[in-house]
């Protein structure tokens, strides 16, 4: 048996059959010629060479040892004196080595031989060239066109001659004629094979072979045809070149070749032209035939090479006959292969080849659609700019190209336009190329202007910088471009121009997508500033370092200490690279943090962790045991380890575990801190936190394992022994603690963390090398397993969480001596597998897998027993599916079979189960046949299989059947047999889960059928499986069935697309044709489902097309199917009978566009998809409209990406109009025409109008949109304004959003003025309808809202808005009065006034606006004296609400005013007005309680009338939200504690007992009010009154009533802290309990007795809540009562709970 191949000892793969037997004979003669006693080199060398020519070993390592001996002997032979015998032997040795070199395929062997040959003396070099050349020629002659593998072997052999081997190059130069002929033959053979094959896998392999051949040809031409040879003019040479050009033309013109192959073909074509033409001929030939016709207008004075010209024409190698990507390949080849002198040579007057290439490339980039072509285009443009940089010094002064290359030149501007169109491209590689282009443009511009130019005065550079700064910070490429600008401008200039740069960049760290780029920019700015400061320091002999530190480090530290998301991203991206490149920043940050009044623990620990990972703490010395590494007190680190903030404790653990040196010694202090962390954080509820914890544990254990090896080598030292003992004790403690954490009552997070830690221990501390070689710590995980531990882990197999079960399963497999322990589990597993509970089948699969893996029962036996049980259940289901659904559902056994087959043991020995495969397939088909009538029923959710009249009489709501066996066993008439209730849901679950398991099992078997030596499935079986999937996906109606059938079908198709059998390889294409035929047919007998989004049909398409291999960077069948589906989806629906194919096509397209796996493939079809979806909104058929709506939703997501911000219309979720229309140019005219059409009848409902506006709302104007006028977004604006007249409110809102997005900054003032002027000036103006007025006001509001708060808005524009536009609003102020009969437009106008007239400080100094403000104030005050609007009028509530808002602002701005207006608002009939007023009042009262002047100024806390009204509303208010605000207002009012409260009713005043009793009743009545804060408000108000009640109780003689109310309050706390309450309510309860803990818990007056103990129950409940915030909120109630050593905020809830049990309960 051959040994296993690997990288170290791989197989030889020698082609010994091609070895020249003459060489063996000659070597044998040398052996015979010398006697056995001869000690010379010759016999030994001959023997070794013979063994290499016919090797007995297949190991590379052994073979290389022999070659090493041969190499040494050859050097010895070469150094000896030369005689005739010796010379002849050496020639034979070289000939033999040439044979070995030629027949080997291993790179290592060939390199060894070439190195040996190169080291021989120069006198033998000619012999080496002759022998290796002769050997190569002989091998090339043996090659035939049929043996493609041997052809590839020869090409690989030729390439090895050129791989850093000078003699090899000379050898090829000597036989270059034969080499060129062979390469031509090989390339032709491979191309012919590509044209003949239809197998995608073979086609990819052959295309790759063509790629290798052409690459080798290029290298041969470059290295072996440097000089001109006589044969270059021979006819044979010309024929060979012609043949090669024709072969390359096939590659360029056929789409079946990969894009990489075509790229190399373009380079090969140019290399061949270079070889066949000389001087200017090749340039003229390339320009005339391989570039556009406009470039062919050349002078005819130069004569072309007639033969090559004819070959190019014959092969069709002209610009017009090549595809667009092939044209790009030719341009790229010319740039890559031609010399710079040829590129800049003048082709015609004033133009060089570079000029023509630039024009061709820039024209091509507008036509590229697919992602690879776009990326290749950007690479070609980048290459052009790099060549321009290299050849710039050769360009003549004052030339056209030099002028065009300046920043404002035409070439640079075209490239910049291309940059702005693609700078935020979805492909990362594209963004990188765009960055390179941007940098190259700047460098070229600097070359044009010269080195002496002052860059700060260069208009081009500074304009670029200002344009970048005005763009949004969410654009990733903005940061990379600014990094480039920093290189040339310097940090000081940038900060001078933009002083807020540090904070702006740090604010951008808020988003995950921009954080890496922002961190790079921040570091670049800091480094540049530091370098500039150091330069100034050298010049002035001063020290300016604090300048840059104070500029960049304090904002960073403040961000680190914040609780925002950006602090975590800053730690992840910025801080490591900053400390790595600037270690001196660490001391500044630490001193800054420790010098603050309160130590910033979070930021300090974070910085130390990053610094330690960088190895910066290793240089600091520890100062005693009180400080850790001399930088942080141990007490502070202890506080961090058990901190209430999980992030801080996790950072502290990382600080302890991380180390730049993996063998750094761990001290006892480290172990104590880690133990403390484990005890308090083992049940961390955050999955991310547990992942980080286990990651740190892994680092810790590896440090222990690797460090112990070093300590073991120093075991003679006492300190090393002590450390090894500490290591062992800690590992044993950790192991015991983890096993003890697996008890049945342990929570899920604790069990997960414990199992994960045990898994790490098992993987690191094993008995096998290389981890432990009887050295290091004396700890082996296998020795820690006791029978109790095994039993504990086995119980984890029943855990309800999959992850825990999987980890326990893996632990048990690796556990020692478990065979006998798990053997009883076999019968249990079989019984559970037959059960009806899905959970039982999962446990059964784990048990059976464990039994099989441990070797207790063979895998074949397990599968056999499972199939026996499955056959029995299938027979039961055939008799009665109802009985099977209740007791024998089949899916459990199927799941177990699938799990067993998925084991590694089964996958490695698939041939052992071949006998069972036929049974498995048959049983799967039988089970599917039984359940398919249910899952394929038109209404599977309520369907019950009815097989006879008896079943037909059974109720469809609930079926009851008796067990026949039990019925026969019933002997006494009074004995009632057990009955089973079977509902339609039970039957459906049984059927769809069974179908799911069948599909997944068949898919898994399909994946295992690749072993050609012992195929698991026959051809017919694979066809049957495919037929099953096709029928299921076309007929199934239940989503659970066809959704998971898709997974199995995709696995099958993935194999069939790549299988070598032609019959099977064609199946996916045939299935696609079948599906398309079924869709086209509108037959009533069609099996396809026209509802349920076409059910499984889209999944069938997805499965086949997702599995299709990518050839030439695209899926060919996918493109053909998309074309046909789009044609079907475009069809006009005329009658009810013809819309079904269109609906199917739309649903399938929706699935295609939504599938992330097809993201790159569907991108070229996005424009066509939108052109299909938008008109479909106007269809008369609802199903078509619905499908078009879902299709448009998928298209929007695929085009603009998933939401990156909660605000759907944020720029983060949008794309610039320039970028959108440059990617999809066809959509510009389409959308413009659509919006023109829909605005012709704005009064009628136009569904497609909303679709167009939805797309346009995702666009925005950027700084760079005004360059091209062909596709300007401004063309849409007139029609968008017309959409504001629509009778549909939603459409008017959408139009307003779109207008605000598409209006550029320079048009803002003009647009706002136009909108204001279009408003009617008086009630008599009937030129505009109320819909038009409302739409105009909405557009104005959205426009101002988008730009008003934008910091990047120029001051001049904002000043014009305030001085010119806004004052015009007073011309239509009648819209705010009752003269305006439309409440909707009145509310919209008042909302506009509220937002931009009464709020913003910009209007304070504008005279016209001050007058306008006064007029509006009078209108509002006058309105407050009138009666409220009738409630039945539309929009009345909106008007009253905005009037209340304005009233509040106006009256609160006055220094003296009464509260009558507030009382009137609180008595309003509209709850919106009451809620608004109460909310404002609560904020004001809260500010007054906190000592704010704004609250005290109005004395609202002392207003008795207001308090009296609040008390009245407490009884009369019915709206829950308003009532909650009433209680909030009472909570903060100063009169609340002045009990009793005055009352109007005859019941008397409110006493403390009465108030508490009322509040308790309210809490009980409103406990379950949905989406209301009423219970929380009640709890907070009661918490304020409880101390008063307690004080009354302590003073009065009769305490029964008070104690009864106090007990009721404690019971209410228990009720509000139950698990079914909301998080907000429980948090409020925790805060309330903390506030009253001094009186109720401690009971200083000793009036409550044992009643105070009842409050500990809700406290303990809150301490065990899932939410960390709630647990931490209740901690002060314990710490203040029992006295911890820490402050309240620093104690972790788990520690507080342990302390509570230790000190109170125990």
Image (cartoon, rainbow, N blue to C red):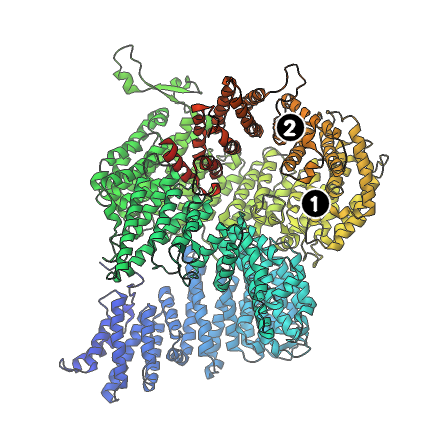
Q: Between 229 and 779, which is closer to the camera in this rendering? A: 779
Q: Secondary structure at mark 1?
A: helix
Q: Secondary structure at mark 2?
A: loop
Residue 292 in view, yes or no: no
Tell me the tag on residue 304.
none
Q: Between 626 and 1665, which is closer to the camera in this rendering? A: 626
Residue 240 x %, y %: 46, 74
| Horizontal arrangement in the rendering, residue 964 relative to residue 1369 (left or right) | left
Residue 1462 x %, y %: 72, 30
Pointer 1 residue: 1345
Disc 1 crowd rating (10 Å Cα; few below 14, some 14-19, many 20+) is some
Q: Is residue 704 above or below residue 1697?
A: below
Kindly indicate the quadrant of the structure image that contains residue 800: top left
Kindly indicate the quadrant of the structure image that contains residue 1191: top right
Q: Between 1435 and 591, which is closer to the camera in this rendering? A: 591
Residue located 66% across and 21% down the image:
1542
Pointer 2 residue: 1535
| Horizontal arrangement in the rendering, residue 189 relative to residue 1239 (left or right) | left
Q: Quadrant of the N terminus?
A: bottom left
Q: Is residue 517 above or below residue 449?
A: above
Asked if the residue under mark 1 is in contact with the one under mark 2, i.e. CB atoms within 8 Å, the reply is no
Q: CA distance from mark 2 to mark 1?
A: 41 Å
Residue 554 in view, yes or no: yes
Residue 292 x %, y %: 62, 67
Residue 1418 x %, y %: 82, 35
Q: Between 1022 and 1107, which is closer to the camera in this rendering? A: 1107
N-term mark: 2 or 1? 1
How many marks do you count on the picture?
A: 2
Q: Is residue 862 above or below residue 190?
A: above
| Direction left: furthest residue | 37
Disc 2 crowd rating (10 Å Cα; few below 14, some 14-19, many 20+) is some
């Amino acid at each position: 048996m051959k040994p296993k191949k690997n990288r170290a000892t791989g197989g030889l793969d020698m082609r010994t059959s091609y070895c020249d037997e003459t060489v063996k004979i000659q070597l044998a003669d040398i052996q015979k010629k010398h006697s056995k006693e001869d000690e010379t080199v010759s016999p030994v060398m001959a023997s070794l060479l013979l063994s290499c020519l016919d090797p007995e070993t297949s190991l590379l390592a052994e073979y290389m040892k022999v070659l090493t001996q041969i190499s040494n002997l050859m050097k010895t032979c070469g150094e000896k004196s030369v005689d005739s015998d010796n010379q002849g032997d050496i020639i034979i040795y070289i000939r033999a080595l040439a044979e070995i070199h030629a027949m080997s395929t291993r790179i290592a062997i060939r390199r060894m031989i070439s190195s040996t040959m190169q080291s021989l003396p120069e006198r033998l070099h000619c012999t080496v060239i002759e022998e290796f050349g002769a050997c190569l020629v002989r091998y090339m002659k043996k090659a035939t066109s049929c043996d493609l593998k041997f052809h590839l072997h020869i090409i690989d052999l030729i390439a090895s001659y050129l791989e850093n081997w000078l003699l090899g190059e000379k050898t090829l130069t000597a036989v270059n004629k034969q080499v060129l002929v062979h390469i031509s033959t090989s390339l032709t053979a491979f191309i012919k094979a590509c044209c003949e094959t239809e197998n995608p896998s073979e086609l990819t392999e052959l295309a790759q072979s063509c790629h290798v051949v052409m690459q080798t040809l290029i290298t041969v031409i470059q290295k072996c045809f440097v000089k001109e040879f006589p044969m270059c003019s021979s006819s044979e040479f010309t024929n060979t070149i012609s043949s090669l050009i024709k072969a390359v033309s096939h590659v360029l013109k056929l789409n079946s070749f990969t894009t990489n192959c075509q790229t190399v073909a373009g380079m090969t074509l140019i290399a061949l032209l270079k070889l066949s033409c000389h001087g200017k001929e090749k340039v003229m030939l390339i320009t005339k035939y391989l570039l556009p016709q406009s470039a062919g207008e050349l002078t005819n004075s130069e004569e072309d090479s007639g033969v090559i010209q004819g070959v190019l024409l014959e092969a069709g190698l002209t610009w017009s006959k090549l595809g667009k990507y092939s044209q790009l390949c030719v341009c790229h080849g010319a740039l890559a292969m031609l010399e710079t002198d040829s590129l800049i040579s003048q082709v015609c007057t004033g133009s060089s080849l570079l000029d023509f290439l630039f024009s061709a490339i820039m024209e091509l980039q507008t036509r590229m659609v697919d992602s690879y072509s776009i990326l290749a285009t950007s690479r070609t443009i980048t290459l052009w700019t790099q060549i321009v940089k290299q050849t710039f010094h050769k360009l003549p002064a004052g030339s056209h190209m030099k002028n065009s290359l300046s920043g404002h030149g035409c070439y640079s501007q075209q490239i910049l336009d291309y940059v702005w169109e693609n700078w935020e491209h979805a492909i990362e590689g594209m963004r990188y190329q765009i960055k390179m282009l941007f940098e190259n443009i700047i460098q070229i511009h600097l070359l044009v202007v010269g080195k002496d130019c002052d860059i700060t005065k260069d208009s081009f550079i500074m304009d670029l910088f200002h344009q970048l700064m005005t763009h949004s910070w969410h654009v990733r490429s903005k940061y990379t471009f600014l990094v480039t600008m920093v290189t040339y401008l310097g940090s000081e200039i940038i900060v001078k121009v933009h002083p807020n740069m540090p904070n702006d960049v740090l604010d951008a760290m808020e988003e995950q997508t921009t954080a890496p780029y922002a961190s790079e920019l921040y570091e670049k700015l800091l480094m540049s500033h530091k370098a500039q400061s150091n330069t100034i320091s050298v010049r002035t002999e001063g020290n300016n370092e604090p300048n840059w530190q104070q500029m960049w480090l304090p904002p960073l530290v403040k961000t680190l200490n914040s609780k925002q998301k950006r602090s975590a991203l800053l730690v992840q991206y910025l801080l490591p690279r900053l400390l790595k490149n600037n270690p001196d920043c660490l001391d500044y940050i630490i001193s800054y943090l420790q010098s603050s009044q309160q130590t910033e623990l979070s930021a300090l620990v974070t910085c130390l962790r990053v610094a330690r990972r960088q190895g910066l703490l290793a240089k600091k010395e520890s100062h005693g045991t009180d400080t850790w590494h001399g930088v942080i007190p141990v007490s502070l680190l202890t506080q961090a380890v058990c901190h209430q903030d999980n992030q801080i404790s996790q950072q502290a653990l990382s600080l302890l575990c991380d180390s730049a040196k993996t063998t750094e010694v761990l001290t006892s202090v480290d172990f104590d801190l880690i133990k403390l962390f484990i005890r308090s954080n083992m049940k961390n509820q955050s999955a991310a936190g547990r992942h980080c914890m286990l990651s740190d544990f892994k680092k810790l254990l590896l440090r222990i394992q690797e460090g112990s090896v070093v300590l073991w080598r120093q075991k003679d030292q006492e300190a090393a022994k002590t450390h090894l003992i500490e290591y062992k004790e800690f590992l044993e403690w950790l192991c015991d603690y983890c096993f003890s954490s697996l008890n049945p009552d342990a929570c899920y997070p604790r069990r997960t963390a414990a199992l994960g830690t045990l898994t790490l221990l098992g993987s690191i501390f094993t008995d096998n090398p290389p981890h432990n070689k009887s050295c290091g710590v004396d700890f082996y995980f296998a020795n820690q397993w006791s029978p109790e531990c095994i039993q504990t882990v086995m119980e984890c197999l029943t855990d309800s969480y999959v992850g825990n079960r999987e980890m326990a399963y893996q632990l048990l497999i690796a556990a020692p001596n478990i065979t006998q322990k798990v053997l009883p589990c076999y019968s249990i597993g079989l019984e559970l597998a037959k059960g009806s509970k899905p959970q039982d089948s999962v446990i059964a699969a784990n048990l059976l897998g464990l039994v099989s893996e441990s070797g207790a029962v063979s895998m074949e036996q397990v599968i056999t027993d499972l199939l026996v049980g499955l056959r029995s259940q299938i027979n039961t289901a055939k008799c009665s599916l109802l009985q099977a659904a209740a007791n024998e559902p089949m899916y459990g056994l199927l799941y177990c079979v699938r799990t067993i087959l998925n084991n590694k043991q089964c996958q490695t020995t698939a041939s052992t189960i071949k006998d069972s495969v036929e049974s498995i397939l048959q049983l799967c088909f039988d089970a599917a046949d039984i359940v398919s009538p249910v899952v394929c029923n038109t209404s599977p959710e309520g369907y019950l299989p009815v097989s006879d009249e008896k079943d037909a009489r059974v109720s469809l709501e609930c079926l009851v059947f008796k067990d026949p066996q039990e019925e026969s066993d019933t002997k006494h008439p009074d004995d009632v047999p057990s009955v089973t209730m079977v509902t339609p849901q039970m039957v459906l679950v049984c059927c769809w889960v069974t179908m799911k398991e069948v599909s997944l099992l068949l898919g898994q078997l399909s994946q295992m059928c690749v072993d050609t030596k012992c195929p698991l499935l026959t051809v017919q079986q694979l066809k049957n499986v495919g037929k099953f999937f096709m029928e299921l996906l076309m007929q199934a109606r239940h989503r659970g069935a066809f959704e998971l059938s898709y997974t199995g079908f995709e696995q099958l198709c993935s194999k069939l697309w790549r299988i070598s059998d032609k019959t099977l390889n064609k199946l996916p294409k045939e299935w696609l044709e079948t599906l398309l035929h079924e869709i086209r047919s509108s037959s009533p007998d069609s099996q396809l489902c026209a509802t349920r989004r076409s059910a499984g049909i889209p999944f069938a398409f997805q499965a086949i097309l997702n599995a299709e291999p990518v050839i030439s960077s695209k899926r060919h069948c996918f493109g053909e199917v998309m074309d046909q589906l789009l044609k079907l989806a475009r069809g006009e629906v005329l009658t009810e009978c013809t819309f079904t194919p269109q609906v199917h096509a739309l649903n399938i397209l929706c699935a295609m566009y939504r599938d992330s796996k097809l993201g790159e493939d569907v991108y070229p079809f996005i424009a066509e998809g939108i052109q299909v979806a938008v008109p479909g909104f106007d269809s008369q058929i609802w199903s078509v409209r619905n499908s078009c709506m879902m299709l448009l939703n998928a298209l929007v997501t695929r085009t603009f990406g998933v939401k990156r911000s909660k605000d759907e219309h944020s720029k983060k979720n949008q794309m610039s109009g320039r970028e959108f229309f440059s990617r999809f140019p066809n959509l510009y005219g389409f959308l413009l025409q659509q919006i023109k059409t829909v605005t012709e009848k704005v009064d009628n409902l136009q569904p497609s109008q909303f679709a167009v506006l939805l797309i346009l709302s995702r666009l925005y104007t950027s700084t760079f949109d005004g360059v091209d006028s062909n596709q300007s977004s401004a063309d849409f604006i007139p029609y968008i304004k017309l959409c504001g007249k629509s009778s549909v409110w939603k459409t008017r809102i959408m139009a307003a959003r779109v207008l605000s997005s598409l209006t550029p900054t320079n048009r803002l003032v003009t647009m706002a003025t136009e909108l204001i002027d279009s408003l009617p000036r008086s009630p008599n103006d009937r030129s505009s309808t109320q819909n038009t007025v409302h739409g105009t006001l909405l557009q104005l509001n959205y426009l101002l809202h988008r730009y008003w708060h934008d910091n990047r808005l120029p001051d001049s524009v904002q000043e014009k808005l305030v001085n010119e536009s806004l004052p015009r609003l007073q011309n239509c102020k009648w819209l705010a009065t009752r003269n305006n009969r439309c409440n909707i437009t009145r509310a919209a106008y008042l909302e506009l006034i509220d937002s931009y007239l009464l709020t913003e400080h910009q209007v304070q100094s504008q005279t016209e606006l001050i007058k306008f403000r006064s007029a509006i104030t009078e209108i509002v005050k006058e309105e407050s004296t009138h009666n409220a609007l009738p409630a039945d009028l539309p929009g009345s509530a909106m008007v009253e609400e905005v009037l209340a808002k304005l009233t509040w602002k106006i009256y609160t701005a006055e220094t003296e005013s009464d509260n009558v207006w507030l009382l009137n608002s609180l008595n309003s009939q509209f709850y919106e007005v009451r809620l608004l007023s109460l909310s404002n009042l609560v904020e004001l009262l809260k500010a007054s309680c906190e000592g704010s002047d704004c609250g005290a100024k109005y004395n609202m806390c002392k207003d008795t009338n207001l308090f009296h009204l609040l008390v009245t509303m407490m009884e009369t208010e019915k709206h829950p939200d308003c009532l909650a605000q009433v209680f909030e207002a009472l909570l903060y009012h100063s009169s609340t504690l002045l009990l009793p409260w005055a009352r109007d009713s005859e019941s008397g005043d409110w006493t403390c007992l009465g108030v508490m009793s009322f509040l308790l009743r309210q809490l009980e009545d409103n406990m379950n009010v949905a989406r209301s804060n009423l219970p929380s408000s009640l709890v907070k108000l009661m918490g304020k009154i409880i101390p008063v009640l307690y004080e009354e109780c302590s003073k009065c003689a009769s305490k029964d009533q008070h104690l009864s109310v106090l007990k009721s309050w404690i019971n209410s706390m228990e009720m509000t802290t139950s698990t079914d309450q909301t998080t907000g309510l429980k948090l409020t309860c925790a805060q309330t309990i903390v506030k009253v803990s001094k009186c109720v818990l401690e009971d200083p007056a000793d009036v409550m007795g044992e009643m105070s103990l009842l409050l500990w129950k809700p406290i303990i409940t809150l301490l065990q809540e899932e939410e960390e915030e709630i647990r931490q909120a209740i901690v002060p109630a314990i710490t203040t009562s029992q006295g911890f050593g820490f402050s309240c905020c620093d104690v972790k809830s788990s520690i507080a709970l342990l302390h509570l049990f230790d000190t109170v309960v125990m």
